[in-house]
Amino acid sequence: MSDATLHATGQDPDNFAVQIADQVESFLVAVTEVAKGDEPDSAVPFLLLEVSQLLLAGGRLGAHEDIVPDERYEPDLGPEPDVDELRERLALMLDPVDVYSEVFDPYEPRKPPVPARISDDLADVMADLRHGMAHYKAGRTTEAMWWWQFSYFSNWGSTASATLRALQSLVAHVRLNQPLEELDGLDTDQDLSEDALAEAAGKVMAEEIAGPLGLREVK
């Protein structure tokens, strides 16, 4: 796709940049709505769906040729929107399943898992996507596409992928009636080995979280 094509967005639904921007905007709106807490019973399945759809856009950006910004230096966007309130609301809603263990790079051998939080991940992804959306809404389409592609490779792609695995695992545990281990006492400021993770894990059955988080069991 040429630079001229990126600029010629208009309202053409077949335009690549328009499609990516629509998927990004849909995710931003959806997660913001979930974080309000009005419908906690559907939070986890809805987040699973939204993160899955976002990663489709990320995959398209990843497969696309390198996008080169118009200017050598990124224009100043002013103060970044604060995501702390959204992070806190998600953390409150997702407790007790917010913390999970993640291996950041599957190609680094013998790397122990580290604790992460779904709420932190979603807030970080939101911050990256909002940054690009500010460029897009200011008419700097190529700058927005460059940022979304670059940050997909450098941050939000791997972060959203980890979040998706955590959400999918959570839903699978409940739907398959499998016990869910609670990472009791585990937090993201700890550096624990696999043995320590196993030692810290306590037994919590999936049905204890199924109702409040909008999941159902397989009968």
Image: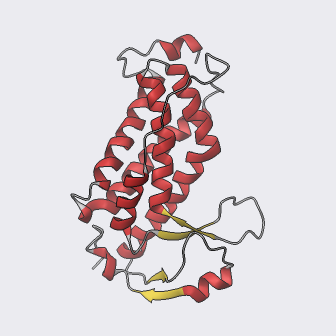
Q: Is residue 96 above or below residue 118?
A: below
Q: Residue at x 40, y 36 (%)?
A: 23
Q: Nearer the viewer, residue 118 or 62?
A: 118
User: In which quarter of the view is residue 40 placed?
Assistant: bottom left
What is the count of numbered marks?
A: 0
Q: Residue at x 52, y 82 (%)?
A: 185
Q: Position of residue 175 (x, y in %)?
A: 35, 73
| 11 sits left or right of 147 in the view | left
Q: Position of residue 123 (x, y in %)?
A: 46, 52
| 22 sits left or right of 128 in the view | left
- Residue reaching furthest to the right: 109
Q: How has the structure been colored for display? A: secondary structure
User: In which quarter of the view is residue 110 placed?
Assistant: bottom right
Q: Position of residue 218 (x, y in %)?
A: 30, 76
Q: Residue at x 59, y 39 (%)?
A: 151
- Residue reaching furthest to the front: 79
The N terminus - image quarter: top right
The C terminus - image quarter: bottom left
Q: Residue at x 49, y 20 (%)?
A: 141
Q: Position of residue 193 (x, y in %)?
A: 69, 78
Q: Is residue 32 above or below residue 97?
A: above
